[in-house]
Amino acid sequence: MTSNPPDLRLHGDTFARGELLDFAVNVWPGGHPVPLRRSLEKALREPGYPDQTSAINAIAHRHERSPDEVLLLNGACEGFWLLAHALRPKRAICVHPSFTEPEAAFRAVGADVVHAYRGSEFALDPDAVPTDGDIVVLGNPNNPTGNLDPAHMVEQLARPDRLLIVDESFMEFIPDEDESLASRADIPGLIIVRSITKLWSLAGVRAGYLLASPELVEKLAAQRQPWSVSSPACAALAYCMGDRRYRRRVATMVAEAREELALALERISGVKTWPSVANFLLLEVDDAPEVISQLRDAGIAVRPAHSFPGLSTNHVRVAVRHAVDNQRLARALRKILVDEV
Ligand SMILES: Cc1ncc(COP(=O)(O)O)c(C=O)c1O
């Protein structure tokens, strides 16, 4: 089904501007481990152009891929725009509700965009995804629903004659990454897009990468300006790939905070939540625009989720933050929905 898109360029940061406690942006507010900060500072002191070698090798090593299967990105988001502009697909299939930048990028180059919707509890239903198209894109874990699909189901979408983009930007939050396809060089047409901006609190640095066949990596690289990924981003990528301990520690901390927040929200009459494996939760509440506005009055920004195709004005996404902040959100929501009735 082809449909009129809602505002595909809307993102959490639009809602978080000003002096608000930010539950709208999906970035873990944890700061940076000291060695990462040192790597960033060292990169800033370098007078020369960026050298991608260490970052590419570190990514290849982490995912057991060849360096020529790695393309550094100026944030995961750049990957969608680069793919769209370099490949100019005629027919793109976007699995929704999901992050809308891939669709925006495909529309910008004139692609015919087809929506395929997730099934019950937002689980991926491979049978609902058309078998044609030049390119298919889906998120795993998926934003804004927070669910993780089994790798064997995602893999079913691959076809020898089309590309399959799996946006694994939130996979860092899963300690063992069992459902990641990042190491699978054998799946035809598979492109994995990854980000380090979320778990490592680096959204402003813009750092991500994609994994694909050497031929596709070469084709994409040929479409770019030189030095398109900055020295701090290269340094951050090189560092973060090797720091498994910090990654697991944050993933565990986020999981605990998320379960506590989910429990507190579920206890509020009128709030529906969905299970999530990421650093955010999708909620549904009656009259959400009014609730969102009252939360703003209470100094809290959340993300209205109506711009994700398939969701309604009563869907809201909230980030997972540290426990004190999460408790403040739950208290504010309870006050709005229960105490003031
Ligand atoms: C699912 C998903 N993929 C990619 C991105 C972009 O990530 P980056 O900051 O690495 O560009 C976002 C940003 O929110 C996202 O939600």
Image (cartoon, grey):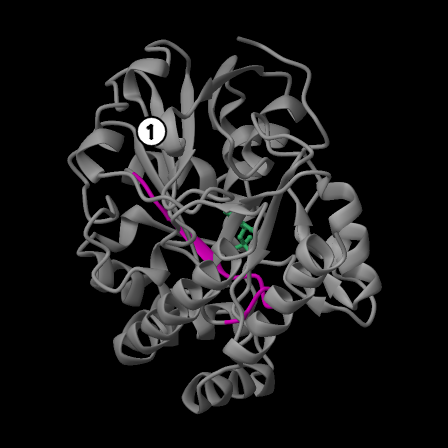
Which residue is located at x 52 percent, y 69 percent?
28
Residue 50 position, x and y percent, is 52, 69
Q: Is residue 21 left or right of residue 279?
A: right
Residue 88 position, x and y percent, is 54, 21
Which residue is located at x 58 percent, y 25 percent?
106
Main SS class of the magenta portion in the image: loop
Give 176 or 202, whichever is nearer the viewer. Answer: 176
Tell me: residue 13, above or below residue 104.
below
Q: Which residue is mark 1?
A: 124
Q: Is residue 188 left or right of residue 203?
A: left
Magenta range: 201-212
Tell me: residue 174, above or below residue 341.
below
Which residue is located at x 41 percent, y 26 percent?
118
Q: Is residue 142 visible?
A: yes
Residue 29 position, x and y percent, is 56, 74
Tell me: residue 98, above or below residue 320.
above
Are there few (<14), some (14-19), or many (20+) residues within 10 Å of tag 1? many
Give 66 or 282, whichever is nearer the viewer. Answer: 282
Kindly state the secondary structure of the residue where label 1 is placed.
loop
Residue 208 is inside the magenta segment = yes
